[in-house]
Amino acid sequence: MTKKLKRTLALAALMTGVGGMASVANATEGWYGRADVGMSIDGQLDGEVADGNTTASFGPDLEGGWLGDVGVGYGFGNGFRIEGELSYRNNQFEAIAVDDPIDDIVNGGTVNTWGLMANLFYDFNRGGRIQPYLGVGAGAARPRVKIEGGAGSASDTVFAYQGLAGIGFAMNDRTMFDLGYRYFMAPDVDISEAWGPGFDSQVDYEHQAVTFGVRVAFGAAAAPPPPPPPPPPPPPPRRRHKQRARRRNSLCTSSGIARTSTKRRSKPSMQRSTARQCNVSGTIVVGHTDTSGSPTYNQGPVGASCFGRPRRPRGAWHGCRFDPNASAR
């Protein structure tokens, strides 16, 4: 039994280690159902039979056979799953000679076993298209052993446990194909009645199999991943730039000079002051050519406006409008 357990662990490690290849797929979450069929690859009845005061070993190997199981489970979304399982196994064993001192020959027989198990699984590579898993289970088994040429058959309900390993292949968001391995053990099965009156016999029922099955999620398909967040908005422009733009587009005139200063300053002096203050880039001069007024009014300049980029006002300057007749008004 030690060698078989080593083979079991080696096979489980091999099936778990192939999960490096992955692409996007949804792991089983919420309620799901599954169904499997499989074939036996190894097994035996390992025990003893006693006839009165004489005891001999009895350990035929199981040959051929198949199994089927169905289960309902729940996936927690973190890799763990729990499920309940109902299984059935059918095997035969060939004729075997019972060791001395009984010195009898068993012509062969059959073993049919029902199992009701609670299993716990862990899925690796959750979210990948290929998801290896490991599992353990415990529950009850009821083997029924029939010996050809014996008194009949014997059934017994005993505690059972199993180890599971496999790989799930995501077919779509809700369905997975399952390739698995199972090691099943039901110890201390009483098959005395199969030998007949006066016999006492107990065996360990051991079974190994490879299974193929499908897992189907009952819930709705998983929601698609959320879209990426929008890029952050650009920072607002600096106010200094806006103020400069307003200054560049402003009108610079010379009307803000105090009226008292125009009486004491000559026209050229005021023009120079206006040019310095306003950074003049253009000048508009307005005059009158009609004859309805006096010659001084008609021939003298009435006003001037200059345009440019204003500088910071100082003193009595509140603009740059130049009006030589301001003192006259």
Image (cartoon, grey):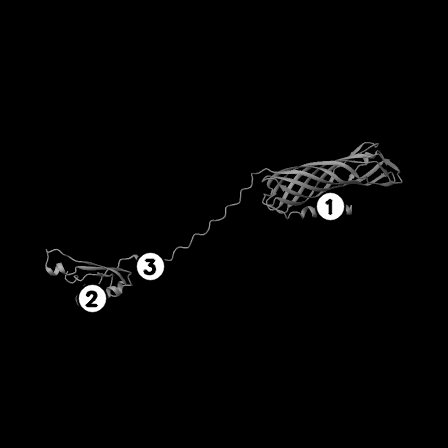
Q: Secondary structure at mark 3?
A: helix
The residue tagged 1 is 8
Quadrant holding the C terminus = bottom left
Residue shown at 33% from the left, 57% from the top = 245
- In this rendering, would 64 be left or right of 70? right
**Can you see residue 316?**
no
Residue shown at 66% from the left, 38% from the top = 213
At label 1, the amino acid type is Thr
At label 2, the amino acid type is Pro
Label located before the other in sequence (1 or 3): 1
Label located before the other in sequence (2 or 3): 3
The residue tagged 3 is 244
Residue shown at 22% from the left, 64% from the top = 271
Total of numbered circles in the picture? 3
Q: Nearer the viewer, mark 1 or mark 3?
A: 3
Outermost residue toward the front in this view = 289
Q: Which mark is residue 93?
A: none
Q: CA distance from mark 1 to mark 3?
A: 81 Å
The residue tagged 2 is 268
Rendered view: 224 above or below 327: above
Report x, y in % for residue 306: 24, 60
**Can you see residue 272?**
yes
Report x, y in % for residue 172: 59, 39
Q: Nearer the viewer, mark 2 or mark 3?
A: 2
- In this rendering, would 328 be left or right of 247? left
Quadrant holding the N terminus = top right
Q: CA distance from mark 2 to mark 3?
A: 30 Å
Q: Secondary structure at mark 1?
A: helix
Residues at circles 1 and 3 in contact by the CB criterion of under 8 Å:
no
Report x, y in % for residue 130: 63, 44
